[in-house]
Amino acid sequence: MTTASRTALLVIDVQNDFIPGGSLPVPEGDRIVPLINQLARQFTQVVIAQDWHPKGHASFASSHPGRQPYEVIQLPYGEQKLWPDHCVQDTAGAEFHPQLHLPHAQLVIRKGCNPDIDSYSAFLEADRRTTTGLAGYLKERGIDTVYMVGLALDFCVMFSALDARAAGFNAFVVLDACRAIDLDGSLAAAIDRMQSAGVGLLQSTDLL
Ligand code: VGL
Ligand code: ZN
């Protein structure tokens, strides 16, 4: 099956820091890479999201003296979970997994670049106001349906899927082409939130 031109695959944050051995490892994050490469061949339109933080980013525990990774603090836009330093612009940890092979991808959308605002979603930053421009890009290209794969299922994939729905796209997440961080039940909560929002949850066998 080759999916129609009104659909796009969005490959989220398959970067070295999210792979075992990286600074914010997602368990089995490397296991999905061959499957993503295979799935991508079904799509003529592929967009890649890349977490791309400046040094000293507000989401890093190291930017808040006395705070530890995975604590939650209050920032002007609301609650922010603190992370180990990760995906710092122009570092090896921010590069894509070396086996990720998406030669026909048309756009790399970098997010989390604002030093004061996190952005799990590839569409909207954590202040819920600043857009990345991705919805406009997809709409101008006539795309109405987005399939999502990548890392982490319970953070960046979930928020991207919810925002895709909020922006009016049909949204599907290919579960076996994702992996979760799963902190304090965040995976089960993410599945619930996506289902409630009308995000379709699929397996890769539904597409291949
Ligand atoms: C992500 C935590 C912090 C993700 C990005 O890609 O899911 N998670 N930054
Ligand atoms: Zn990040």
Image: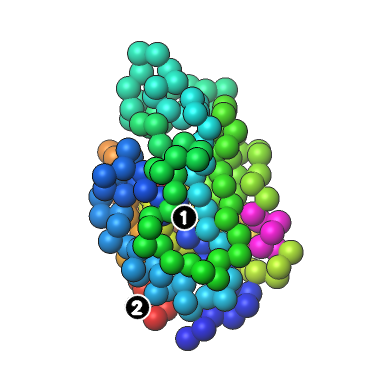
Location of residue 86 with respect to 173 vertically, above or below? above
Write the residue at 45% across / 40% down: 91
Type of secondary structure dominating the magenta stretch: helix
Q: Secondary structure at mark 1?
A: strand
Residue 100: quadrant of the picture: bottom left
Q: Is mark 1 within 8 Å of ligand 1?
A: yes
Residue 152 or 198: which is nearer the viewer? 152
* Side of 100 where 169 appears, left or right: right
**Circle nearer the N terminus (1, 2):** 1
Q: Position of residue 72 (x, y in %)?
A: 39, 26
Q: Are marks 1 and 2 in contact (CB under 8 Å)?
A: no
Which residue does the numbered mark 1 point to in the structure image?
12
Q: Is residue 109 visible?
A: yes
Q: Position of residue 30 (x, y in %)?
A: 30, 57
Which residue does the numbered mark 2 point to in the structure image?
205
Query: Mark 1 and mark 2: span between their CA atoms?
Result: 20 Å
Q: Is residue 138 covered in magenta?
A: yes
User: Magenta segment range?
Assistant: 134-139
Q: Position of residue 207 (x, y in %)?
A: 42, 78
Q: Amino acid at mark 2?
A: Thr
